[in-house]
Image: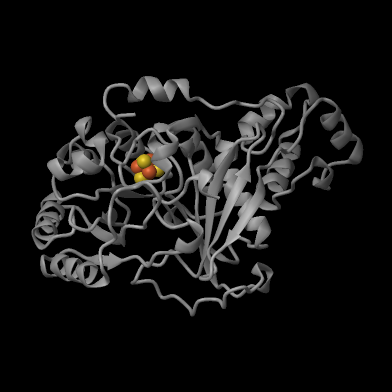
Amino acid sequence: MSAGGKLDTFILDAAGPRPGAGLFGLNNQQLTEQLGEFHLPGWRIRQLETALYSQRVTTLDEVTTWPKDLREQVKTAGFEVRLTRIAETFRSVDGTERYLIACADGQTVETVWMPEGDGAEDDDSAPEPASGEAPSARSWTRATICVSSQIGCAVNCQFCLTAKLGIIRNLTAGEIAGQVAAVLNRHQAQPGRDRINLVFMGMGEPFLNYDAFMDAARLLAGPMAIPESRMTVSTSGIVPGILRFAEEPIRPRLAISLNAPNDAVREAIMPITRKWAIADVIEAVRKLPLRPRERVTFEYVLLSGVNDQAQHADEVARLVRRANFPARVNLIAWNPGPGVPFAMPDAQSVDAFQQRLRAGGVPAFIRRPRGRDIYAACGQLKKTMD
Ligand code: SF4
């Protein structure tokens, strides 16, 4: 579909199920309300929160701080943890793993694990793990998890495989945070001890599922103990979402999926530009109170012959300079996918684009593609590609 006027209506229709008996994904107040019939004191609710989000239990039987009869009563009343689970794993030669994560209604969503960071060139990455190594071998020292916010996507970026699905439904806060919990459990990772970064750059447009996305971000930053400064959300430029985001006391970092030097080029590859032009997006980003040393990231997928020419780089540099807030550009060579009519730029033109941006005074970094062989790289997430 076009991302024009129909978008808001479409998203309203795509609201996901809100299962009443699943506890994972509820915050302290919601847990208190849901379990109101048991008249539990606050400390019992806090014990449950610790079990759900810090220990990441998968059944109520594992909430061992509760007496057995309380666990049984709560189970008998129909409550369960209902954590999303990994249904299928695809492992890349570079150590990246792509998962199909099963939701309670049988839908699946995609999540990606990237050991040693997200591939940004400025990362102080340790050597890559050897291919075929078991994930439990702890060959990683830090990792990034790429999280989905919707099943499918309505935004219809022309270079993106997920767009081909259309929007199927929104994910709940529990399903968003649950992807992280399921992946942390698989790798026995512990935020606090292990350096875990999150990028909300998987399937979907987080700002078109704003409330569930922010509820999940608060759970992740709170009881799941992942610092907000280690989370980044990427938006295609949903202006009302950016304005709400700017008001949030706790929030991830912001990335704008720019991908074009001007509205004309952007409209051809991102129809959402017809609704919100680049200038509108930049104006909204200006409202974001940045933390010390924080920069806004502009993501730029390079498509050969479309947006990767020298004059495009000069235009992007001007645009970023005029934006006049601390920013950086992440360059990503487009990842090929079947039925998507673009060509991948060669390494030289990617390097040349970076140099041109840097010469124009803009910090620019090249992101190495991760998991391209398993369709885990940027813009490649589409569950029918198994
Ligand atoms: S790039 Fe992101 S916003 Fe655009 S269609 Fe794909 S998932 Fe949606």
Q: Is residue 377 visible?
A: yes
Q: Is residue 51 above or below residue 229?
A: above
Q: Quadrant of residue 103?
A: top right
**Relative side of 208 to 32, left or right:** left
Q: Is residue 249 visible?
A: no
339, 155: nearer the viewer? 339
120, 344: nearer the viewer? 344
- Quadrant (top left, top right, bottom left, bottom right) of the N terminus: top left
290, 282: nearer the viewer? 282
Ligand 1: which quarter? Answer: top left
Q: Quadrant of residue 125?
A: bottom left
Q: Quadrant of residue 300?
A: bottom left
Q: Position of residue 113 (x, y in %)?
A: 54, 59
**Relative side of 61 to 94, left or right:** right
Q: Position of residue 235 (x, y in %)?
A: 34, 43
| x 65%, y 42%: residue | 84
Q: Position of residue 115 (x, y in %)?
A: 53, 67
